[in-house]
C-alpha cells in the first residue's frame, strides 16, 4: 500500500496560520493562491500583507509569526501514531479540496490512503430502529463487491452500525470525529475505534488532542464526512437531524445523495423522505448506489451474481440446514419486530416450543431478540 507524502513543515506552517483570528480557510486559500506556497505565505513581506489583509488581521498575522513555529505538539502526535495532514500535502484527499470550506489541517490515525478510495458516507439517527440496523447492514454488505470505504461519524445508532458492518464485510471504514482523536464519544465505541485502525481504516479530526465536542463541532465535522465522500447515504433521521445536515452539504457540493425510504408514520423516516422529495436517490439495495456512482466493474459483478445473492436463494440455503420446526418458525418471523404472542398465532407453535427454537435460531445468527418480548429476522 502506497501512502502519500505528508510534510511536517507544511503542518507546522498551517497549524500556526489557522490559529490566527479572522483567517478562515477561504481567506487563507486566497492568500495561498497569490503567495504560491505556504512557506512563502508564512514569510510574506509587510507589503504583501498590507495589500491583501485589513489592518486588524495583518496585525494578528504578524504577532503570531513573531512567536515562531512550535514543533513540540507535532512530536507528541508522531509518538502517538497520529499524522498531521495539511492542505499542501500530497496526502490531502482530492475530493475534500473541492468543498467550499476545506480544513487547512486535519489529524489522522491510521491509513491516510483510505480517504481517497471509493468512499461512501452513511449517516443517520442516534436513536436507530431495528429497521435502521437491518437496512444499514444489508446495504453495506451489498457494497462489498465495489470495495467501498464506509465513512461515518462514530456516533451511536446508524454510525455505529455502519462502521461495524464495514468491518464485518472486510471493508475499510473511516470515522470522522467532532472532537480530538483522544476523546472517543460515546465511550462504548472505544473498541470500535481500535478495530477500525487494526483493520486498515482511519480516525480523522480537524481538532487538536483534548478538544471536547460541542454543538458547533459536530456540524463542522459533517462537512468533512460529506467532503471526503463520493456520496452520502441517509438511513433514518428526523427533519432536523445532523444526518440531514450532512446530506444537504453533500447536495450543495454536487455529490450523490441516497436515502432509504421508511414508514411514513415514523419520525425517523421524515429526514430521508424530505431528501427524496428534494432529489435524493431512493435506495432499496446496494445496486442502486453502485449504478448511480458508476462503479461499473463492481456493479457488473453484482449483476452476474444476482441469482446467487438474492434474498430468496440465500433464505432457501439457510432453510436447508434447519429442522422442520425451525423452518416453520423462521418463516413466520418478519423483519419488523413481532411479539411472541403474535408469533404463536402465526406459527401455530406453543410458547414453550417457540422459546426453545428462538434460542437455537439466535445462536445461528438468524434472528434478533428484542426488549418487550419481541423478535425479528436478522
Image (cartoon, rainbow, N blue to C red):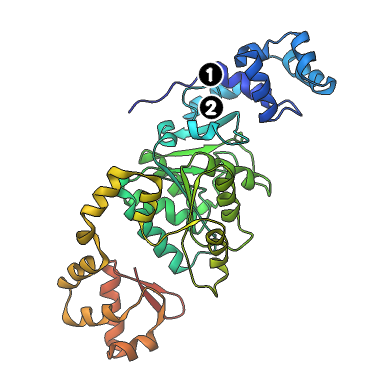
Left or right, 245 with respect to 290, comes to right
Residue at image x 60%, y 19%?
12
Task: Find numbered disc 2 in the image and state the secondary structure of the residue it sits on.
Answer: strand
In the rendered image, residue 107, in percent from the top left (x then y), is placed at: 54, 32
Disc 2 residue crowd, few under 14, some 14–19, many 20+, Cα 10 Å: many
In the rendered image, residue 363, in percent from the top left (x then y), is placed at: 27, 68
The disc, 1 or 2, on the residue closer to the chain's N-terminal end is 1
Left or right, 252 with respect to 128, comes to right
Classify the position of the N terminus by image quarter.
top left
Residue at image x 37%, y 44%?
294
Task: Residue 317: name its quadrant.
Answer: bottom left
Circle 2 is placed at which residue position? Answer: 84
Task: Residue 356: name its quadrant.
Answer: bottom left
Q: Assess whether mark 2 and mark 1 are in contact (beta carbons under 8 angstroms).
A: yes
Task: Find numbered disc 1 in the image and state the secondary structure of the residue it sits on.
Answer: helix
Q: Nearer the viewer, residue 304 or 163?
A: 304
Circle 1 is placed at which residue position? Answer: 8
In the rendered image, residue 172, in percent from the top left (x then y), is placed at: 37, 42
Residue at image x 60%, y 24%?
73
Residue at image x 54%, y 52%?
186
Q: Is residue 178 visible?
A: no
Q: Nearer the viewer, residue 98 or 127?
A: 98
Amino acid at each position: 500500500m502506497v501512502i502519500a507524502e505528508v510534510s511536517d513543515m507544511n503542518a507546522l506552517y498551517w497549524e500556526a496560520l489557522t490559529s490566527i483570528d479572522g483567517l478562515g480557510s477561504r481567506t487563507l486559500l486566497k492568500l495561498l493562491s497569490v503567495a504560491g506556497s505556504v512557506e512563502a505565505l508564512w514569510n510574506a513581506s509587510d507589503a504583501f500583507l498590507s495589500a491583501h489583509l485589513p489592518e486588524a488581521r495583518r496585525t494578528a498575522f504578524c504577532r503570531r509569526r513573531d512567536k515562531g513555529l512550535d514543533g513540540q505538539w507535532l512530536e507528541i502526535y508522531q509518538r502517538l501514531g497520529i499524522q498531521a495532514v495539511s492542505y499542501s500535502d500530497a496526502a490531502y484527499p482530492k475530493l475534500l479540496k473541492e468543498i467550499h470550506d476545506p480544513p487547512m489541517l486535519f489529524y489522522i490515525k491510521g491509513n491516510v490512503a483510505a480517504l481517497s478510495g471509493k468512499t461512501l458516507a452513511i449517516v443517520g439517527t442516534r436513536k436507530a430502529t431495528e429497521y435502521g440496523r437491518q437496512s444499514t447492514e444489508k446495504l453495506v454488505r451489498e457494497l462489498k463487491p465495489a470495495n467501498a470505504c464506509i465513512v461515518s461519524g462514530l456516533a451511536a445508532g446508524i454510525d455505529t452500525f455502519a462502521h461495524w458492518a464495514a468491518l464485518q464485510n472486510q471493508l475499510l471504514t473511516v470515522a470522522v470525529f467532532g472532537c480530538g482523536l483522544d476523546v472517543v464519544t460515546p465511550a462504548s465505541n472505544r473498541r470500535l475505534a481500535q478495530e477500525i485502525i487494526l483493520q486498515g481504516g482511519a480516525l480523522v479530526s480537524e481538532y487538536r488532542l483534548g478538544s471536547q465536542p460541542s454543538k458547533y463541532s459536530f456540524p463542522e465535522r459533517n462537512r468533512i464526512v460529506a467532503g471526503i465522500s463520493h456520496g452520502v447515504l441517509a438511513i433514518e433521521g428526523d427533519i432536523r437531524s445532523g444526518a440531514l445536515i450532512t446530506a444537504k452539504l453533500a447536495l450543495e457540493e454536487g455529490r450523490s445523495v441516497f436515502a432509504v425510504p421508511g414508514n411514513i408514520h415514523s419520525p425517523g423516516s421524515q429526514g430521508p423522505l424530505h431528501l427524496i422529495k428534494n432529489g435524493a436517490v431512493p435506495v432499496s439495495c446496494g445496486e442502486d448506489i453502485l449504478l448511480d456512482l458508476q462503479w461499473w466493474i463492481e456493479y457488473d459483478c453484482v449483476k452476474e451474481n444476482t441469482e446467487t445473492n438474492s434474498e430468496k436463494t440465500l433464505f432457501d440455503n439457510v432453510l436447508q440446514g434447519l429442522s422442520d420446526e425451525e423452518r416453520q418458525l423462521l418463516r413466520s418471523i418478519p423483519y419488523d419486530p413481532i411479539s411472541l404472542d403474535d408469533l404463536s398465532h402465526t406459527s401455530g407453535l406453543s410458547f414453550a416450543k417457540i422459546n426453545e427454537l428462538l434460542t437455537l435460531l439466535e445462536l445461528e445468527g438468524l434472528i434478533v431478540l428484542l426488549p418487550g418480548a419481541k423478535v425479528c429476522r436478522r
